[in-house]
Image (cartoon, grey):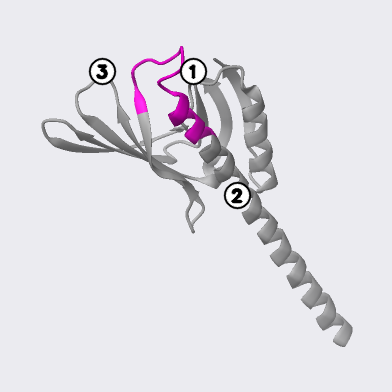
Amino acid sequence: MKQFKLVQFLFLILLSGIGNMAFAQEKEIVKILNRELKKEVKNQIKSSNFNGDTIRIIEEFSITKDKKLTFTIKKTSPNFTGYQIIKQEVPLNKILKIAKDLQIILETERNAVSETFITFNEEKKEEKLQGSMFFVYLTIEKRNEHLGDELQKAFEKAGYKVTKEYWYD
């Protein structure tokens, strides 16, 4: 009987260790995304690829208690007056693919991404959308397919199967 309890105890320790490893890898996903977003903000105006759109970080990438990846930015653009506050949120287990087509995108199950756009110009307007693409707002760095590989590995180590698809600058 004592041996059975010891086996149960060791099994519980093993399970908690696996959970901690997955949590550590979720932190790694956030670390990578925040590192790259900070580089993007720092270099956006200096880039030869600068198109006039600028972003500022309002809330860095984070993972909520209910395992949702989220972040908030402020965007200005010559294509509209004023500015937008953009918040995106997606459950980690709904992310299917990572890809790049001018910017890095996390493709998800249908309507898994919640986006809130608050536009401030003559008047304040809020729009909420559901979609299948989580835009990471990383556009400036080119020939960075290694970043896709790094993110894919971090997702995999955290227990999420995410495939890397096309990677076009």
Residue drawn at x 69%, y 56% as measured from the top left: 21
| Residue at image mark 1 | 102
Q: Residue furthest top?
A: 48
**Sequence order check: which comes first, mark 1 or mark 3?**
3
Q: Is residue 86 left or right of residue 112?
A: left
Residue drawn at x 74%, y 71% as measured from the top left: 12
| Residue at image mark 3 | 79
Q: Is residue 16 magenta?
A: no
Q: Bin the neighbour count of mark 2 within 10 Å (Cα to Cα): few under 14, some 14-19, many 20 and up.
A: many
Identify the disc placed on residue 80: none
Query: x, y (%) of residue 150?
Result: 66, 34
The segment highlighted magenta reads 36-54
Q: Bin the neighbour count of mark 1 within 10 Å (Cα to Cα): few under 14, some 14-19, many 20 and up.
A: some
Task: State if disc 3 and disc 2 touch (CB < 8 Å).
Answer: no
Query: x, y (%) of residue 153?
Result: 69, 38
**Sequence order check: which comes first, mark 2 or mark 3?**
2
Above or below, comparing residue 163 to residue 4 in the picture: above
Tell me, yes or no, if residue 121 can be seen here. Answer: yes
Judged from the image, the secondary structure of the residue bearing numbered disc 2 is helix
Judged from the image, the secondary structure of the residue bearing numbered disc 1 is loop
Q: Is residue 50 magenta?
A: yes
| Residue at image mark 2 | 26
Residue type marked 2: Glu
Residue type marked 3: Asn
Above or below, comparing residue 88 to residue 55 in the picture: below
Residue drawn at x 46%, y 12% as measured from the top left: 48
Tell me, yes or no, if residue 1 can be seen here. Answer: no
